[in-house]
Amino acid sequence: MDDIMIVMKFGGTSVANFEAITRTIFIVGSKLDQKPVVVVSALSKITDLLYKIADSAASQDLAQTTELLGQLRERHVNLVKELLEQSPMIMEQALARVNEICNDLDKLAYAICAVGELSDRNKAILISNGELLSSTIICFTMNAKGIKTGFVDARRMMVTNDSYLKGEPIVDEIAARVPGIISEAYEGMNAVITQGFIASNMAGEQTVLGRGGSDYSASLIGMAIDAERIEIWTDVDGVRTADPRKVKNTKYLEKISFEEAAEMAHFGAKVLHPLTIEPAVKKNIPLYVLNSMNPSGKGTAILRNELIEDGVKSVSFKENIKVINIFSMKMINTSGFLRRVFEIFSENKVSVDLISTSEANISVTVDAGEKIDRLVEELSEFCDVIVDDDKAQVSVIGKNIVRLNGMLKKTFMPLKRCNVYMISQGASFVNISFVVDREELTEVVQDLHDHLFDNPEELETY
Ligand code: ASP
Ligand code: MG
C-alpha cells in the first residue's frame, strides 16, 4: 500500500466499559490522518468468562452455563445501551447484531452441554465471541460518533495451521490476504476495525492464536500492510525495568530494542505477547507500548538494535517454573544422548527455557503450565529424573550485557546469601538467567534491581 497506515491495538482494559471505549475512540479519532487499522481484544475478563462457559458446558452444568451466558449477554447489551444512547437507530442495529452473536453462542454452549463433550474446534468457536462482540460494538459506536469505520472479520485474513486453540500463523498467506481486504474495507472510510486473537485455518475453520494473542495479530497485520508504526495500547505507561507489582522503585523505559523486548516477553515480563516482536522485526516496523488512560504519555518505543544503547534494561522473572533434572551415567562419553532426550521433549511438545549440562546431568526449566507427566515417564525409561517445582527463574536483560565488564559480578554479588542454580548466559549477549528457590524470589529480584539500577555507570564495555 502506498499511503501511510498505522496499526492501533487496544487490549481488554482499553475497551472494558463505557469510559474506556469512549477514551479509545477519542484516541483513534485523533489519528485519522494516519489511516488507522484498529485491532481490538475482547472486553476485559470476557475471554476468561468464555473459558468458564466452555468448562461448565463441557461438564454439563446447565444451571451455571445459563447463568454465565446471561452475564455475558447482559454486559454487552448494557454497554451498547450506554454507548449509543444518543443514536437510537444505530443502537437498534447494534443490539440486533449483539443479540445475534449471543444467540449463536448460547446455541453452541447448550449443544456442548447436551453431549458433555467439547472439542478444541468448538472451543475455538466459542471463545472467539469476545472479540466479535467488542469489535462489533466499537464499530457501531465509532460510526455513531461520525468516524466512518469499516468492519473486517479477521477470520478472512488471519490464517493459521490446524491447531485450533494455539494456531500458528501462516505468514505468507496472511501477507497475501491482508492488504487487499484492508484496502477494500477502507474504501470511503476514515478507519477500519478488526479483531485480535481470532483466525481460521486454510479450510476456513475457526482457530485462535492462544491467550493474549491480540498483540500478535496486530503485529502480523502491521507486517502485512507495511505499517508505519504498530501501537499497542494498554493500561500501563510503557515497559518498566521490572514488574512493579513485585519490585519497588522500577523505572520506565523510553526505548528498548526488538531483541530486548523479545527476551523480556519470553522471560517473564508481561507487557507483550512473546511472539509480537517477530513480524515487526521482519519489516523493521517500530512498536510502541502506550497507555490509553494517559494518551499524552510517551510510552515505550521498541526499535531496531542500532538505535538502542548497551546496558541492562530489565530484571524479568518467572515465578512458576519446573526444573527437570536428568541424570544418566550413560551420558558420559557417548554421543546421541542429548538428541534422544530432546527428541522426547519435542515429541511431547514441551517447550524448554533454560538448559544446563554437565558430564552426567542435564537440567532444563519449563513453564509450570507445561504438561510433563508423559515426558518424565518416557525419560525415566533410560535416566533418573527429578522434578523440582519449588523454583523460580530470574533473567537480567539488556543489550550486550554479557559483554559488559563486571556484569556477572554485579549480577551475582547481591545474591550472596541464596542458592543459585543453572546459570545461563544467552548466546545472544542480551540475557543472563538463573534459577533460585521460589521462596527467595521476591528478595532476589528486589536486591538485584536495586543493585543494577542504582549505579549502572559502573559498567563498561570491554
Ligand atoms: N482476548 C484474548 C485473551 O484474553 C486475546 C487478547 O486479549 O489478547 O487471551
Ligand atoms: Mg490481553
Image (cartoon, rainbow, N blue to C red):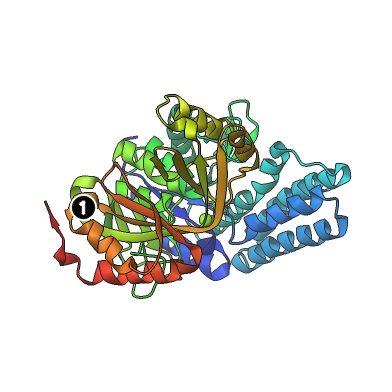
Query: Residue 367: x, y in percent?
Result: 53, 50
Residue pictured at 51% horizontal, 32% vertical: 341
Q: Residue furthest bottom?
A: 248
Element on which disc 1 rests: loop
x and y percentages locating residue 305 in the rendered image: 23, 46
Residue nearer the viewer, 163 or 456: 456
Residue at image x 31%, y 37%? 283
Residue 32 can be seen, yes or no: no
Amino acid bearing label 1: Ile
311 on left or right of 394: left
Mark 1 CB in 8 Å range of ligand 2? no
Badge 1: residue crowd in 10 Å (few <14, some 14–19, many ≥20): some
Q: Nearer the viewer, residue 395 or 382?
A: 382
Q: Is residue 202 left or right of residue 265?
A: right
Q: Quadrant of residue 115?
A: top right
| Quarter of the view holding residue 81 | bottom right
The structure residue drawn at horizontal position 51% and vertical position 41%, both measured from the top left corner, is: 326
> Could you tell me residue 324's position as x and y percent?
52, 46
Q: Exactly how many numbered labels are in the figure?
A: 1
Side (left or right) of 170 relative to 113 = left
| Residue drawn at 23 percent across, 60 percent down | 409
Quadrant assignment for the N terminus: top left
Between residue 18 and residue 163, name the one nearer to us: 163
Q: In the rendered view, would you say 384 is above or below 238? A: above
Residue 24 seen = yes
Quickly name the residue at label 1: 308
Q: Position of residue 234 (x, y in %)?
A: 45, 61
